[in-house]
Image (spheres, helix red, strand yellow):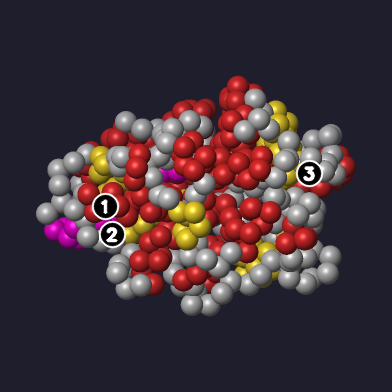
Amino acid sequence: MPTDLYKVTLSEDQIPTHWYNIVADLPTPPAPPLHPATGEPLTPADLAPLFPMGLIEQEASTERWIEIPAAVREIYRLWRPSPLYRARRLEQALGTTARIYYKYEGASPVGSHKANSSVPQAYYNKLAGRTRLTTETGAGQWGAALAFAAEIFGLEAAIWQVRSSFEGKPYRSAQMAVFGGKAVASPSELTAIGRKLREQFPDTTGSLGMAISEAVEVAAQDPNASYSLGSVLNHVLLHQTVIGQETLKQLEVFEEPRADYLFACAGGGSNLGGIAFPFIRENLAGRQQVKITACEPAAAPSLTQGEFRYDFGDTAGMTPKLKMYTLGADFVPDPVHAGGLRYHGMAPLVSHCYHEGYLSAIAIKQREAFEAGVLFSRAEGIIPASESNHAIAGAVRQAKATPAGETPVIVIGVSGSGQLDLPAYTEYLSGEMPNT
């Protein structure tokens, strides 16, 4: 029988020593990224203007385990291992016999899982002698995480934040400024592509694709700068696998030999891949049979409504072409509050796993997401990020569908804290939230 614990927090010496690379275990290899001009597979030299070689090697690696540098693990100790909770009060509120667990990444210094990748990205750029990082951010979690990591390693962080989030979540840019980063609303007047987009779409709320284009443009023109991406690319998802590795260990402490369902929010794919890839490894090895569900916003349903094809990762067509589920690089989602999920495509590795049937996907409208978030907050005492609410909503659906007397194990990836999302919660509670 499971223990009566409420939470399991591993000791610091149990922080993973290696990142897990799912590419090594996939029966069919994912399609390679292509050069945007030639259409040929990318080479390391093609990526060198934007990324340091340490990250380029990880992007193309087929090794199963990649060692986490000691300097990165030392910083990870600030918040890792993150806790795994048994959601006993949520179970009671739902009247379910399912056993629900949630992995909470909101305990990091920046309040989300994003620091798991920002720290190693800043580290490898510092080693390469870069002095400036450029990036995009949707809801602001990634921007804050990169500003935090850049400050640790003495780098400058220039951040283009999607305009709808920049205006709707002012404390996000303030958080970035406290950490030493500088955020501007995208599209901006600071780049050629930003000015072009503002002229072409004067009232645009912006998109991650637009913000990526601006950050890439600036990095490509500065030999001392690198571009840093908070999701989508292989090396980003690789860094996030510390989440799933810890979760598997913590379930053992809870005396749960297996999980039945895993729910995680999905925008670009970093949070989903981070918690799900170690479970997919267990499934492929025949040790578990976990049903993994990507919970995406109905406003940007790349997996459930997109096409599986090569597409640009940004609006302007400056990035490599990626084989992924996409709604089209020019797609601009409705300005839902889950800004971190407002992306036109899905990470190639997540897309590949979805295409091969290793995970499923559902699209959730934001009212259902926030209904689940409020229920979770009142039961568990944690206000989740807008993005995380989608995973919680998927798990709530499953828990409610559990036949009486059955006790499936449901795991939720709660990717971050929603303390800076309170205006969105206020809108929901007032009944004014659009159901997009």
Task: Identify the residue under disc 2.
Answer: 259
Residue 147 can be seen in this image: no
Amino acid at circle 1: Leu
Q: For label 3, count other residues whose C-alpha is less than 10 Å away and answer few (under 14), some (14-19) or many (20+).
A: many
Label at residue 251:
1
Residue 31 image position (x, y, % from top left): 63, 72
* Disc 3 secondary structure class: helix
Q: Nearer the viewer, residue 258 or 13?
A: 13
Residue 417 location, quadrant:
top left
* Disc 1 secondary structure class: helix
**How many numbered tags mark residues here?**
3
Residue 424 image position (x, y, % from top left): 51, 32
Label at residue 219:
3
N-terminal-most mark, 3 or 1:
3
**In the rendered structure, which segment of residues is drawn in magenta?**
402-415
Q: Which-is-in-front pick, marks 1 and 2?
A: 1
Amino acid at circle 2: Ala
Whether the magenta-drawn stretch holds residue 262 is answered as no
Q: For label 2, count other residues whose C-alpha is less than 10 Å away and answer few (under 14), some (14-19) or many (20+).
A: many
Q: Nearer the viewer, residue 22 or 368?
A: 22
Residue 66 image position (x, y, % from top left): 51, 57
